[in-house]
Amino acid sequence: MVAAAHLMPSDFEAKPFVKWVGGKRQLLPSITRLIPELGKNAVYHEPFVGGGAVFFHRQPRRAFLTDSNERLIRTYRGVKKDVEGVIRLLRSYPHEKRFYLEMRARDIDADDDVDVAAWFIYLNRTGYNGLYRVNSQNGFNVPFGDYKNPTICDPDNLRACSRALRGARIERRDFESVLGRAKRGDFVYFDPPYIPLTATSRFTDYTSEGFGDAAQVRLRDVALELKARGVSVLLSNSSAPRVYDLYAEDFDCVEVDARRSVNCKPNGRGRIPELLIR
Ligand SMILES: C[S@@+](CC[C@H](N)C(=O)[O-])C[C@H]1O[C@@H](n2cnc3c(N)ncnc32)[C@H](O)[C@@H]1O
């Protein structure tokens, strides 16, 4: 009966199994309202998948998920292919600083996707703030988080995620490669590293490559080409003036408040407006 238990309706609700900078959970209602109904053969594309909050919420039947972070992509594959193997490994990992430091130093890239997934989830759950940061040799270097009782393994959610990933192709790619796949009637949600609101913001440091203005312009051009092709496009970004420069002429820009559902202060303090561009 264990297998049947995996199919209980509550298991169908999936949420990201990693904490990820820029996670979209608070904005889900505003975002999902702007996602069109997908036709029978339509494919959902998410070229900056990160934690995948929108994908897991929407659970499209057919999807193409990509990201430039190879270990993250291998983690998705491990969870998709052998979620029980990932759960077994996670359950065997103790929450101890010494073990964390050993894991962090492990040469993980030579191992298989299930090992990479357990390694990635463990470090994400027990490392400081769920950050993903590497040094110039691609060595993971986030300090131990020292949390009291972190959820290292949530088996029900991991199983729900694995299920949601069944119809997904998952590859490490640059976002521009979506042009080789998306066709009329498909839907693309782009959640790129944001254009910083202030010059000191460091939120563009997602990978060693960074994501500067040239990449933002390239992204806008990709969105324009998709639009011309009849692909529905939705894009998140900050409300920096540069974002309006890039998009206001050809797209509809909607300002949304990341905190609205939690705390709507009339004086606007604590508001973090973002843009949804379609
Ligand atoms: C804002 S995060 C995505 C957040 C995600 N939507 C969520 O809900 O957690 C941006 C992602 O873009 C990826 N990325 C950065 N540069 C990229 C590129 N050139 N092509 C594809 N992905 C890229 C990063 O690895 C990171 O996962």
Image (cartoon, rainbow, N blue to C red):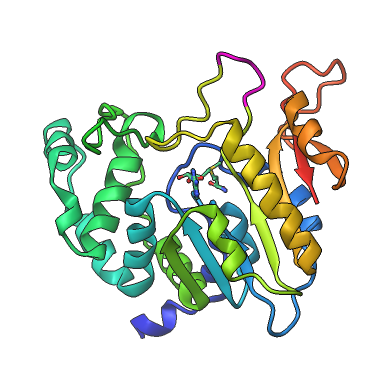
Residue drawn at 61 percent across, 64 percent down: 179
Left or right position of 146 against 276: left
The stretch of residues the image draws in magenta is 196-200
Q: Position of residue 175 (x, y in %)?
A: 54, 54
Left or right position of 208 against 234: left
Q: Position of residue 130 (x, y in %)?
A: 39, 36
Q: Give the image quarter of residue 96.
A: top left
State the predominant SS element of the stretch in magenta.
Answer: loop
Answer above or below: position of 15 versus 210.
below
Left or right position of 57 against 138: right
Specify whether residue 246 is painted magenta. Answer: no
Residue drawn at 38 percent across, 70 percent down: 80
Residue drawn at 62 percent across, 46 percent down: 191
Answer above or below: position of 35 versus 268.
below
Residue drawn at 88 percent across, 41 percent down: 249
Q: Give the image quarter of residue 106.
A: top left
**Count of marks overlaid on the render:** 0
Q: Is residue 244 visible?
A: yes
